[in-house]
Image: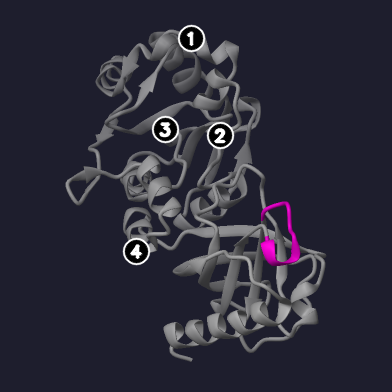
Amino acid sequence: MQIDSSLANILTPTAIALGNFDGIHRGHLEVIRPVLEWEGETVYQTVVTFDPHPQQYFTGQERQLLTPHQEREIILEQLGIQQLILLPFDRELVKLSPQEFVDRILVEQLQAKFISVGEDFRFGNQRAGNATDLVTLTAAVGIPTRIAPLEMDGGSRISSSRIRAALLAADLTLTQELLGRYYSIVGTVVNGQEIGRSIGFPTANLNYPQEKFLPRQGVYCVRVDTKEAQQLPGVMNIGKRPTVDGVNTTVEVHLLDWDGNLYGQQLTVYLHQFLRSEQKFPSLAALTNQIQADCDTARGFFQI
């Protein structure tokens, strides 16, 4: 998959799914799917999103993302998308009127032949244009635009905010239902304090993107993809490790019945089940006993 933040280097013509796509949840998939199924003239199947997220641009505050760029790229490539364009969300883009956005971005630069957006899509200066406006403006220049209806679950709209709330509540069943997949964390294994190794439970300490949205702190049953193997069962802790007077939030994974060197490798960790909240234990011995209990629970969960 080609990835570009400069419109000067993109592959054209395109069939595009247009939106923010943080999370790439089931609602987003309904916007992306028509691009993958497009049977018109030969085009590059493309997702166009904005960088930074528009809310971050307007508030000036860094936004925690369900899928930072690295994860979003992995998921989109797995779906079969050929090109990801990170459209710079800057002052120049913000001041474009809806008509100018269509003419300059969609027609001239992207050479769009088909467009797919969600029902709640807004564009142009002060969000003046909506999805229906986009259909009208693009139809005038011969570009068909499809509006994907809002995807519902349990009577409520599927949204990134609902997924965030579910993760903070450690409701992984609802999270998986809304995403259509397990929530994941991608990171590179770096050196830690090796406290886990000293008590018989070596852990992989993950260096993850700082903009990554983390779920409720605590212990989880997980499966892990490494460079050499996939879906390895394990236990993950997200938190500050109060028993050893930790200060910063860490993400550490212990693989069950596995031994090897993971330093420098990129891991993808899939969250399957919340086990317990993080807590401070009176001693390393008490912590060790609890970790053993967590591992036993995880083995039961994975039936191994």
Single out the mark in the foreground, 2 or 1: 2
The kind of secondary structure the magenta stretch mainly shows is loop
Q: CA distance from mark 3 to mark 4?
A: 28 Å
Mark sitting earlier along the chain (2/1): 2
- Please give the label number shown on residue 173: 4
Q: CA distance from mark 4 to mark 2?
A: 24 Å
Write down the region rendered in magenta.
241-249
Q: Residues within 10 Å of mark 2 (few under 14, many from 20)?
A: some
- Callout 4: helix, strand or loop? helix
Mark sitting earlier along the chain (4/2): 2
Single out the mark in the foreground, 2 or 3: 2
Mark 1 sits on what residue?
A: 96
Mark 2 sits on what residue?
A: 63
- Residue at image point 51% right, 8% down: 95
Q: Position of residue 213 (x, y in %)?
A: 54, 47
Q: CA distance from mark 2 to mark 1?
A: 24 Å
Q: Is residue 36 above or below residue 48?
A: below
Whether tag 2 and tag 3 are in contact, CB under 8 A, the answer is: no
In-image side of 54 versus 262 (left or right) = left
Identify which amino acid the numbered label 4 is placed on: Thr
Whether tag 3 and tag 4 are in contact, CB under 8 A, the answer is: no
Mark sitting earlier along the chain (3/1): 3
